[in-house]
Each structure stands twice: as C-alpha cells, then as structure tokens.
Amino acid sequence: MLVIGLTGGIAAGKSTATAFFQDRGVPVIDADEVARDVVAAATPGLAAVVAAFGPQILQADGTLDRRRLREVVFADPAQRHRLEAILHPLINSRIRDRLQQVTGPYCILAVPLLIESANLRALVSRVLVIDVPEDVQLARLMQRDRMSAEQCRAMLAAQASRAQRLEGADDVVDNATDITALTRQLESVHARYLELAGHAGIHAP
C-alpha cells in the first residue's frame, strides 16, 4: 500500500487535512492518537513516564496531566529527550501494527515529528507537508492553546524548522489562507495519490 506521511509544524492545520482524507474514505493513522493510547490509564507506558518524571505529572484520577508534562519537557531539552526515549519505541511499534491492518489504495500516516523520526520516515512512501509561515503558526498556537509567546516559541523550537520540513517534503500544501484554498490543494494531492496507487477513481469524492 502507498503510505503518505502527513506532517507540518504545530498549529499548521494537520487535523483539518487528516479530516479531509478521512471524509474521502482514506484510512488515517494519527500518531498523536497512538501517543495518547500508549500512556492511557494503567498502561505500562504511563507507568514508565511516572517513574521517570514523578507522580506530579498525574491528575487526581490517575490519568496523565498532559499540560503539566508538556511544561516540564518543553522547558528542558534533556527532559524532552528523556520522554521521547520512553515513548517513541512504544509509538513506533503500535503504528507498525496498525499499518498492517489498514486496507485501501493508500493511507495517511499523520506524524507531527515525521521529519525528525528516521524510524517513521522509513515507513512512508511520500511526505506531504502542511505548510504555514512561522508567524502565522505562532499566532494560531497562542490563540488555540492560550499559551504565552515564550511557551509557544519553545514548542516551535522543539520541532524541525520550516526549512527542514520543506526540504524533506515530496508534496507541499499551503495553509496560510483559508479552508477553501486548503481543500482545493488537498483535492489535487488526493487525486495524485490515487493515480500513484494505481487506483484512479476509487474513493474519489
């Protein structure tokens, strides 16, 4: 199966793009969803994170306090790398399992840190980048997550740069304007992926 790696900086519009593909019957594996699954309550993944960062990253009900953990790891690169060393092997294994189960002409593997992950890049045939200028990205992130500019810049700095993502892209969709323009571009890449997969017309809108 043709596997398309969909990525982009935080607040670039990846969720909107994945929803577009899902609406057209394209299977989507979302690495963020997988990441949440591996640290769900009572999982070995959550136990490992608590052992590394302490019980203060838990909420009263025993679930992960994602906001607190995010504050810890994005304030200290060493802590972020420590978390990644715990979670990435679990996430990669779960994604490989899901890829073996999906069917269709092609599928989308949505990974925010695809450019940074050699293991996951090895699983995809092409890389589709949802692109926005960094100032637009920062403004959207501040509005969406109600975070300070300093916190948002720290999150952006923890990801690949815009230039690195574009360099690693096979296909680029510009999401700096509006949903109409985004949809028009996604329609084009969807048709191309169906053609590349040898199933032109199947699951077409």
Image (cartoon, helix red, strand yellow):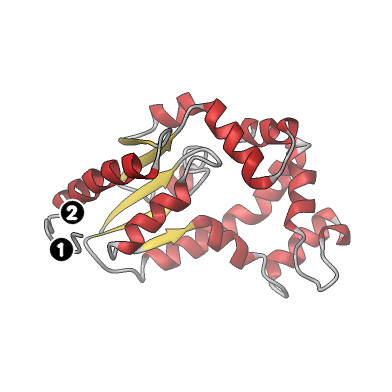
Proximity of marks 1 and 2: CB atoms separated by less than 8 Å:
yes
Nearest to the observer: residue 182 or residue 103: 182
Q: Amino acid at mark 2?
A: Leu
User: Residue 63, position in %: x, y?
Assistant: 76, 69
28 left or right of 88?
left
Q: Give the crowd class for mark 2: few <14, some 14-19, many >=20 residues within 10 Å.
A: some
Q: Which quadrant would residue 73 be assigned to in this image?
A: top right
165 left or right of 205?
right
Q: How far apart, in angstroms, are the residues tagged by discs 1 and 2? A: 7 Å
Nearest to the observer: residue 199 or residue 24: 24
User: Residue 202, position in %: x, y?
Assistant: 15, 63
Q: Is residue 66 above or below residue 159?
A: below
User: Residue 12, position in %: x, y?
Assistant: 49, 40
127 left or right of 112?
left
Nearest to the observer: residue 143 or residue 101: 143
- The residue wearing badge 1 is 202
Tag 2 secondary structure: helix
Quarter containing the C terminus: bottom left
User: Residue 48, position in %: x, y?
Assistant: 75, 62
Q: Give the crowd class for mark 1: few <14, some 14-19, many >=20 residues within 10 Å.
A: some
Q: Which quadrant would residue 147 be assigned to in this image?
A: top right
Residue at 24% in and 44% down: 189
Tag 1 secondary structure: loop
Residue 194: image tag:
2
